[in-house]
């Protein structure tokens, strides 16, 4: 049995969680004060995921870079592979917030989207 200690990010309380895991399954959770804490503990201990954020170069843009992120969480073990896949990706201006920059990154079913507008260079 493995004991994991986590700080919950499900709500602003930031509860200190203690999670007992055995054979990849959560056996017991303590320290949470709401259902979000329980859900967070299970997800973090059985299938951790993250949203990825970075910046990409803009060609002919009024700004040199545009911020991007994954639309949803991707598996935590794919973070570095995702960043490597985005290395060298360039976007032609104009760019609109919400625009899909990379479809289905690493076959996760998750798109990488722009998070701001970048106008074309005048």
Image (spheres, rainbow, N blue to C red):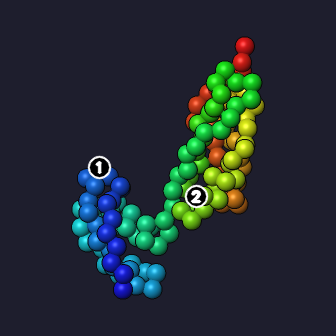
Residues at marks 1 and 2 touching, judged by CB atoms closer than 8 Å = no
- The residue at which mark 2 appears reads as 79
Which of discs 1 and 2 lies nearer the camera? The answer is 2
Among the 4 quarters of the image, the one containing residue 67: top right
Q: Is residue 98 visible?
A: no
Residue drawn at 29 percent across, 49 percent down: 12
Residue 56: percent from left, percent from top = 65, 38
CA–CA distance between discs 1 and 2? 25 Å
From the image, which quarter does the N terminus lie in?
Answer: bottom left
Q: Tell me if residue 22 comes above or below residue 59 in the rendering.
A: below
- The residue at which mark 1 appears reads as 12
Residue 116: percent from left, percent from top = 58, 31
Reading the chain from its start, which is encountered first: label 1 or label 2? 1
Q: Tell me if residue 97 comes above or below residue 71 in the rendering.
A: above
Q: Horizontally, is 115 left or right of 27 in the view?
A: right
Residue drawn at 33 percent across, 65 percent down: 6
């Amino acid at each position: 049995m493995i004991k994991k200690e986590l700080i919950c990010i499900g709500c602003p309380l930031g509860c200190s969680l203690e999670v007992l895991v055995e054979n990849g399954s959560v056996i017991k959770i303590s320290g949470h004060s709401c259902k979000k804490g329980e859900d967070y503990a299970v997800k973090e201990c059985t299938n951790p995921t993250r949203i990825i954020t970075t910046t990409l170069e803009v060609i002919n843009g009024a700004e040199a870079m545009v911020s991007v992120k994954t639309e949803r969480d991707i598996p935590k073990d794919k973070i570095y592979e995702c960043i490597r896949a985005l290395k060298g990706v360039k976007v032609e201006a104009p760019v609109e917030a919400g625009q899909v920059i990379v479809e289905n990154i690493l076959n996760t079913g998750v798109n990488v989207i722009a998070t701001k507008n970048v106008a074309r260079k005048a």
